[in-house]
Amino acid sequence: MQSPRPAAKVPAPRIATSEGPTLPQDSLSALTWLVEAGADEAMGEVAVDRFAARKAPTNPPLEGGSKNAEHFSGRGQAPVTEFRPSPKPAVRVSTLPQGEGSDSIGDAIALARAATSLPELKSALESFDGCALKRSATTTVFADGNPLSRILFIGEAPGRDEDRQGLPFVGRAGKLLDKMLAAINLDRSSAYITNVLNWRPPDNREPSPEEAALCLPFLRRHIELVDPLVMILLGGTSVRHVMGRSDGIMKTRGRWLEYNAADRMVPVMPTLHPAYLLRQPAHKKLAWRDLLAVEQKIISQRALEQSAGGS
Ligand code: URA
């Protein structure tokens, strides 16, 4: 029987600490100490400075799990990877206060892009302080109706009633919009409604290009998430900001346009805004014609999707 090896009395070496530079040390006694501790085999060709490795800045995790962490398996082998789930990347937004050099449009794009559902997009919008309109508004007006209908109406901006209630088209223009919907057998359970602007401009003035530019990233993401079959733009302001066309609603209304929603082409019908129709009731017949075209398009789009799904 082998007698237990007497514990060797080896002086503990003075070795490098995480605190700072290497302390003077007796390398022979350090080696002896390691051998006595059982570390009697070289693991690699090149020594690894573990203190430096611990202090080195860590890279942000990569997407995909298997590539996002590494450790050394020893014996001079290449680093191997191990699985760790990636946390959802945090959205980076400007740190400077609004108006003092922060990139509010960039922030809006980042926040909107990170939203993967309508509730997430709504919260992102509510957390966004880059648009000055938000300060004078009472509420953030996101949307109303049924997004699953995929029939998307886009107006201009909330008015006083919408600002109070937090819903689009609930005032006089909204009542007329409800009648327009009913004319083609739609209502708020079979259509979805939002606006270019999510905050009421003071005194219902027309939104400035800057204000619209700050809301557009959210609107574009909103459209992507709804994935509409058909889109209806209410009024010239909506057509200008959504389609980049400023040739006037009387010219654009009644003609199909196409919107690129994440590489899916969506048919778009520009028509007259209900608030305009309240002032110009004689033009209701034009809107009526546009809506009949919308009704037909909904039928044909549904048939197209069904045949594509069934093939
Ligand atoms: N006008 C709009 O464009 N949107 C509303 O929500 C209300 C009135």
Image (tube, helix red, strand yellow):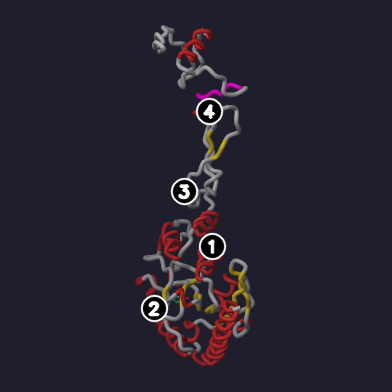
Magenta residues (range)? 46-51
Q: Is residue 229 left or right of residue 161?
A: right
Q: Is mark 1 within 8 Å of ligand 1?
A: no
CA–CA distance in space, label 1 to label 4? 42 Å
Q: Which residue is mark 1?
A: 217
Rendered-image quadrant of the N terminus? top left
> Which type of secondary structure does the marked residue at label 2 adopt?
loop
Earlier residue among tags 4 and 3 = 4
Residue at the far left in the pictured view: 165
Q: Earlier in the sequence, mark 1 or mark 3?
A: 3
Residue carrying label 3: 87
Quadrant in the picture for residue 217:
bottom right
Q: Secondary structure at mark 1?
A: helix
Q: Amino acid under label 3?
A: Pro
Tell me the residue that label 4 is attached to: 53
Question: Does the CB distance between marks 1 and 4 fall below 8 Å?
Answer: no
Residue 19 sits above or below residue 214 on the image: above
